[in-house]
Image (cartoon, grey):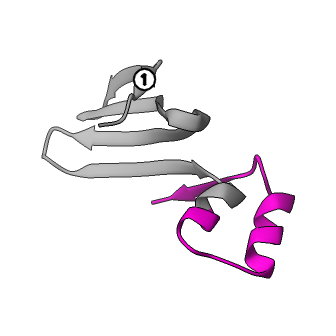
Amino acid sequence: MLAVTMDGVDFTLKDGRIWYDNLTMVFPENFDLKFYGSVGLDETVDLTVSVPVRAKLLERFGVRGPVVEYARLLEGARVAVR
């Protein structure tokens, strides 16, 4: 089990969709995922999650060599996955 905290989220209802922004889940070691997008009343989902670039995460997955060095240079940048 992991201790996860949730941080602020803003909801808006517009054009038959519930829009959300900045829903943040913070995991141990200050690893956070930020979610934004919308859920339609027609049961469709438009979801994007923003993931921080972290060398430590790549190392945990066994990545070695220059990729880890690039991750260190990009530390603090985020990648949006849709």
Callout 1 secondary element: strand
Residue 8 position within the rendered picture, expressed as x and y whole percent measured from the top left: 47, 18
The relative height of residue 68 versus residue 31 in the rendered view (above or below) is: below
Given the current orientation, which residue lies at the most extreme bottom position? 65
Please tell me in which quadrant of the rendered image residue 38 appears.
Answer: top left
Please tell me in which quadrant of the rendered image residue 55 appears.
Answer: bottom right
The residue tagged 1 is: 5
The relative height of residue 74 versus residue 12 in the rendered view (above or below) is: below
Residue at 75% x, 70% y is 68
- Whether 17 is among the magenta residues is no
Residue 54 position within the rendered picture, expressed as x and y whole percent measured from the top left: 68, 55
Q: Choose between 61 and 39: the one closer to the eye.
A: 61
Q: Choose between 50 and 71: the one closer to the eye.
A: 71
Give left or right: position of 1 versus 44. Answer: right
- Residues drawn in magenta: 58-82
Give left or right: position of 19 versus 29. Answer: left
Residue 15 position within the rendered picture, expressed as x and y whole percent measured from the top left: 29, 34
Q: Choose between 22 and 39: the one closer to the eye.
A: 22
**Identity, as a three-letter code, of the amino acid under mark 1:** Thr
- Whether 74 is among the magenta residues is yes
Residue 21 position within the rendered picture, expressed as x and y whole percent measured from the top left: 47, 31
Residue at 78% x, 52% y is 75
Residue at 69% x, 78% y is 64
Total numbered labels placed on residues in the image: 1
Query: How many C-alpha atoms fall within 10 Å of the one at disc 1: few (<14), some, or many (≥20)?
Result: few
> Is residue 76 something that shows in the picture?
yes
